[in-house]
Amino acid sequence: TLITNGVDEGIFLDPEPVDYQKISGLEGKFIAIYVGAHGINNDLETMIEAASCLKDHPEIHFVFIGGGDHKENLIRLCREKSLPNVLFLPPRPKQKIASYLAGGDVCLLAIKKGAFFNCTLPNKLFDYLASGRPIVATVPQEGESARAIRKLGAGILCDPEDGAQMAAGIRQVYANKEYFHA
């Protein structure tokens, strides 16, 4: 029997969305959001690659919320790539995450390639699902996360470690906002 992670539905019932319009530089932007650990195993480099692919699309902005031992490396990578479309925010309390997700337009999930990662079912996936926002995920197609997203029709699946595919998925959600936010 597999008993998966869960989510405190109470914090997702009617959250007051964060007004990204009030955050400098994000007025009128389509927000692609990642919430969680900024560690080596979280494959945020794929999301940075997607941001790089979309840096000529000023209407799309990436927001990373969280902390971790790899965060400074990711910030440095964004500086090296001259990415004006990425914002890093510090960790927020779990009770506030629903508001940040509610203010976003698409949630991002990336899981590395490999048999070990096939069984990965991150907590953030459940938060994303509870938020009702579409998910663009670069995950092993035969893995547990892909199965959950596919079964629930919760978003777009891309090959793991493929930032260009993730960027295409984000553009697809952006171009079809009415469908994905219905």
Image (cartoon, rainbow, N blue to C red):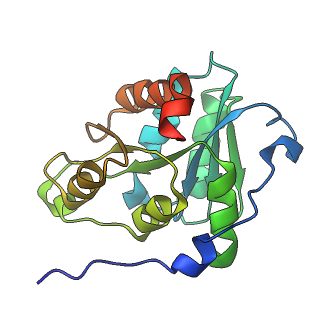
Q: Tell me where residue 53 appears, x and y as whole percent.
A: 50, 22
Tell me the residue at 70%/71% (across/down): 96
- Would residue 123 be visible to someone looking at this image? yes
> Based on the displayed image, in which of its 4 quarters is residue 93 positioned?
bottom right
Tell me the residue at 85%/46% (across/down): 23
Quarter of the N terminus within the rendering: bottom left
Q: Tell me where residue 57 appears, x and y as whole percent.
A: 63, 18
In the image, taking residue 1 as reference, residue 9 lies left or right, namely: right
With respect to residue 118, does 78 lie above or below? above
Tell me the residue at 42%/50% (across/down): 109
Q: Tell me where residue 60 appears, x and y as whole percent.
A: 64, 29
Residues 60 and 7: in front is 7
Residues 115 and 97: in front is 97
In the image, taking residue 58 as reference, residue 116 lies left or right, namely: left
Tell me the residue at 52%/50% (across/down): 133
Marks counted in the figure total: 0
In the image, taking residue 112 as reference, residue 114 lies left or right, namely: left
> Based on the displayed image, in which of its 4 quarters is residue 59 positioned?
top right
Residues 43 and 14: in front is 14
- Would residue 112 be visible to someone looking at this image? no
In the image, taking residue 182 as reference, residue 96 lies left or right, namely: right
For the view shown, which residue lies furthest in the front direction?
182
Q: Tell me where residue 19 appears, x and y as whole percent.
A: 81, 50
